[in-house]
Image: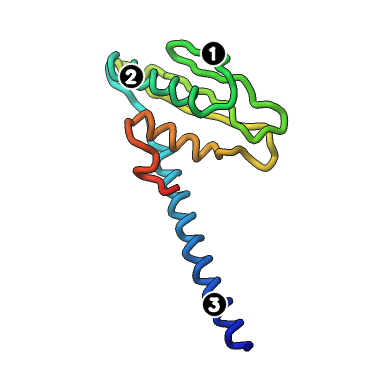
Amino acid sequence: MFGKWIAGLAALSAIGGCAGQAAQERYAAQVEIANRPIICDGQEQCEIMWSRAIQWVKNNCAYRFQTVSDDLIQTAGPNPYSIEPAFVVNKLALGGGKYQIEFDGGCDNMFGCSPTILEAKSKFVMYLMGAHPNDAIAQ
């Protein structure tokens, strides 16, 4: 009986180790994607990416837009104690017709946001780059 209990614990430990490794790999992929600079080159590409940025925020934020301009997207919020993040997206001129799009967000909950800002940013980057988030990050 004791041997079966030990074998069961060993099996659960092995399963937990695999799940932990998968979570670490998913986290590492999210960090890598979220840290990619988003740079557009030329008016046409920048307009496409900026419209995609507006669409992503609209589809992924619980709050209404507070500001939408040619170089700033800002939502209302976050509400006190809420886990839902608010977002700010800036388009910064680099010169020569190139721009960098920067994403930030946050919530007002001591336990964190849902989705996490890392998860939201990695999905934002993938969306702007024209890829589906599940292409690179297992859910």
Q: Which residue is mark 2?
A: 48
Point 53% across, 23% down: residue: 88
Up-down relation of residue 54 to residue 38 (above or below): above
Q: Which residue is mark 3?
A: 10
Residues at marks 3 and 1, CA–CA distance in whole angstroms:
54 Å
Residues at marks 3 and 2, CA–CA distance in whole angstroms:
52 Å
User: Residue 39's image quarter?
Assistant: top left
Residues at marks 2 and 1, CA–CA distance in whole angstroms:
19 Å
Nearest to the observer: residue 103 or residue 51:
51
Q: Residues within 10 Å of mark 2 (few under 14, many from 20)?
A: few
Residue type at mark 1 is: Thr
Point 50% across, 18% down: residue: 73
Q: Horizontal placement of 44 versus 71: left or right?
A: left
Up-down relation of residue 20 to residue 29 (above or below): below
Q: Which residue is mark 1?
A: 67
Q: Nearer the viewer, mark 3 or mark 1?
A: 3
Nearest to the observer: residue 98 or residue 86:
86
Per the image, label 3 sits on a secondary structure element best described as helix
Name the quarter where the N terminus is drawn.
Answer: bottom right
Per the image, label 2 sits on a secondary structure element best described as helix
